[in-house]
Amino acid sequence: MSQIEQHLKANRERHLQELKNYLAIPSVSALSEHKEDTRKAAEWTAEQLKTIGLEHVEIMETNGHPVVYGDWLRASDKPTVLIYGHYDVQPVDPLELWETPPFEASIRDNKIYARGATDDKGQTFMHIKALETLLNVNGELPINVKVMIEGEEEVGSPNLDAFVDTYKEKLQSDILVISDTTMIEKGKPTVCYGLRGLAGLQVDLKGAKGDLHSGLYGGGVQNPLHALTKLLASMHDENGKITVDGFYDGVIALTDEERRAYDALNFDEQALTKELDVPELYGEEGYSFLERTWVRPTLEMNGMHGGFQGEGVKTVLPSEASAKISCRLVPGQDPDDILEKLYAHIEAHTPAGVTVKTTPFDKGKPFLTPYDHPAIQAAGDALESVYNEKTAYTRMGGSLPIAETFSEILDVPIVLMGFGLPSENFHAPNEHFHLENFDQGLRAICDYYTRVANLDLD
């Protein structure tokens, strides 16, 4: 057993207790009542960076939640790695579906359950502990590092583009490493080379000036709920294809090489159907599940609201109805262009008798990087050496808008080296993180940073 492994094993219980402390902070960036909690998480993160031996640690203000920065730049003539993560988390609703309190981390079946366990406190924490391990075992790091951990990723990182542009010299590096993605399946190490973009909006329909008695007015006045469902139904055909005019314009088709690579993964769609407890999978006709979720754009309804929500029946025509919509975008699509096309579709398909208001929210461009870059291949080699399993190079369906920002502003190769699993309920009740990936991931990160020291990145 190497010294790195010995150190990680000897400190495992301490690491897990520290992670529990981190997860106990309800840093929900989307909710104003958790503003101070989110600040507390930033302070906790900064204190950890100082404790492990990083230098120039500071909490840097933005127009929203702050960014935590620290570095260690003493490895002469070695590459510099910028590590990105986020300390904010999603809201916990619906609370009643959690088996244990979302901010009281519990371990069962070798998994740690809490909001943020996998997205992204757990994975960010692993990089902090990997750096701590390398410093404690070797007395120094094999590379130069800059650590940047933000608090607004779960609300679309609205202030980070300006932050990165302002501090681009401070953040300049040779490689950017992000652990905020998943492995393709349990036991299968994965390096992601592409992520989808994002464009979201809210649609609000307004009917009468107030709720109406359905007996007196039903059938004679437009019901906003009826109008909303008709409008939303107009956005797809019966085969799952998006019917918004021009939505697929510019989409870059999957190459034959990529399709063969995805087929070689032998992804078990039947097993997924069983795991999700659905009668069958569904999506755009003519594509596999991996293609639908990695390389095809989507338009999804995330929530609808209107009318009486309480127990029992209240026979009214509601005066208002609303829906939240998000689109996942692929290379060749631009979020601003997609939003304009959505606005045009909504205007053309809004039923008579209601007025409509649209409000944009999260936006982000898709991201794609060559998977034969030496920094990415070194990540695959490090993962393979720890997991004893060939690394999969994949795209993934989620969005990380900051990846495109880093690529454009810093012009740096991005390594998406995730340790979560698709089944870990991120953004849902009972979020959890498999501790086998916590343990193996720590070793792989240490191995990777050691390998980077010897890369020729010119």
Image (cartoon, helix red, strand yellow):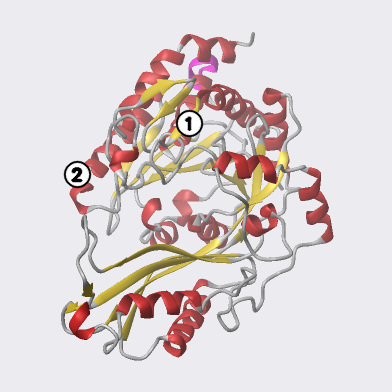
Q: Is residue 179 left or right of residue 20?
A: right
Residue behind mark 1: 433
Dominant SS type (magenta)? helix
> Which of 449/266 is in front?
266
Residue 370: which disc? none
Where residue 226 appears, as percent x and y from the top left, is 36, 78
Residue behind mark 2: 36
Q: Amino acid at mark 2?
A: Glu
Which secondary structure lies at badge 1? Answer: strand
Q: Is residue 387 left or right of residue 357?
A: right
Q: Amino acid at mark 1?
A: Phe
Figure check: 458 above or below 435: below
Residue depicted at x 83% and y 52%: 260
Q: Earlier in the sequence, mark 2 or mark 1?
A: 2
Q: Is residue 411 left or right of residue 23?
A: right
Residue depicted at x 59% and y 11%: 3
Where residue 172 appears, as percent x and y from the top left, is 52, 50
The answer to if 325 sits in the magenta stretch is: no
Residue 455 seen in the figure = no
Q: Which residues are magenta?
A: 135-139
Question: For the residue carrying disc 2, how many other residues have a C-alpha within 10 Å: few (<14), some (14-19), or many (20+)?
Answer: some
Residue furthest to the front = 215
Residue 84 seen in the figure = yes
